[in-house]
Amino acid sequence: DLGSISTTLPKSMANSLWNTRAISFLGCAAQLFMFVFLLAAEYSMLTIMSYDRYVAICKPLHYGTLLGSRACVHMAAAAWATGFLSALLHTANTFSLPLCKGNAVDQFFCEIPQILKLSCSHSYLRELGLVVVSACLAFMCFIFIVVSYVQIFRAVLRIPSEQGRHKAFSTCLPHLAVVSLFISTGMFAYLKPPSISSPWLDLVVSVLYSVVPPAVNPLIYSMRNQELQDSVWKLITALLQ
């Protein structure tokens, strides 16, 4: 989350302070690579975390066997490798295109759809094909998350004690909130109909999916911490007084 924000916001803030919109070609490529790398890795991690919740709640006696330290290391390495490979392929494909429609990216950071608009070569279809493949893989991960949570909720509702159900829900809800925020903002950004597209709306939507989730995620996860909850409550009480 910190990496995602650090990839886009500092350069945008510096450009605002110095009243410029310039970014070097290599800087743009590096920004795109890091952004795709971190987003793909985070989405892979969120998918793995749904499996972790599923095993913890639906198969608690097998948790130590299915999710031992070695398995966790392998899954984490797979998530980072997926992000790296995805970023490498997208960056190489995008920046191998001839850009003949100027060099002005109509966005506050280097984003694949905005760069593709600058290309007048049919080679951009290769990158579009890669985007479609990535979208299909992301959809498969989404289905996996949904199926995991269907099984989780079925298991939770069978727990006889209210305290047990509350503990299970408190384990899942932060992750579910992060997944919902991550997926909903991303889907709205890339699946909104062209008829409602405008430079101002594209900017707002890009901020929604590139800045808001990474900024809010740490707070969502931390709200399970009792000390943080007490501190937030004290702060709210002090403000109201």
Image: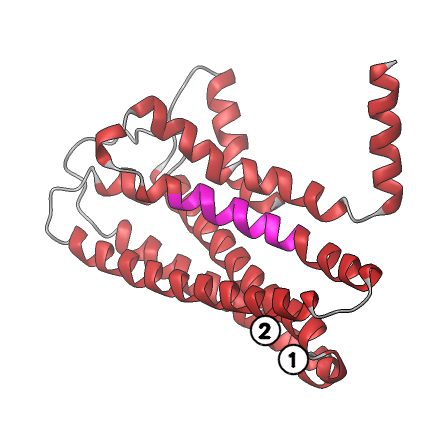
Specify whether 116 is left or right of 235: left
- Give the camera-side residue of 237 and 41: 237
Pointers 1 and 2 in contact (C-beta within 8 Å): yes
Relative image position of residue 105 (x, y in whole percent)? 30, 31
Q: Position of residue 185 (x, y in %)?
A: 45, 41
Placement of 172 over or under 119, stated as above or below: below
Nearer to us in this view, 179 or 29:
179
Which mark is on residue 13?
A: none
Name the residue beneath numbered marker 1.
71
Q: Is residue 27 left or right of residue 61?
A: left
Residue placed under numbered mark 2 in the picture: 75
Image height of 162 relative to 72, above or below: above
Instruction: Tell me the residue at 79%/49% (across/down).
Output: 224
- Helix, strand or loop at mark 1: helix
Q: CA distance from mark 1 to mark 2?
A: 6 Å
Image location of residue 40, percent across then percent down: 47, 57
Quadrant (top left/top right/bottom left/bottom right) for the C terminus: top right
The magenta stretch spans which residues? 174-187
Q: Amino acid at mark 2?
A: Met
Residue nearer the viewer, 231 or 39: 231
**Residue placed most toward the observer, 141 or 105:** 141
Visual colour scheme = secondary structure
Does the stretch in magenta take in 195? no
Q: Position of residue 153 (x, y in %)?
A: 62, 64
- Work out whether residue 111 can be spotted: no
Residue 159 visible in the current orientation: yes
Q: Quadrant of residue 93?
A: bottom left
**Magenta stretch: includes residue 183:** yes
Identify the residue shown where x is 14% and y is 37%.
100
Query: Few, some or many C-alpha atoms within 10 Å of disc 1 (few <14, some 14-19, many ≥20)?
Result: few
In the image, residue 237 above or below residue 221: above
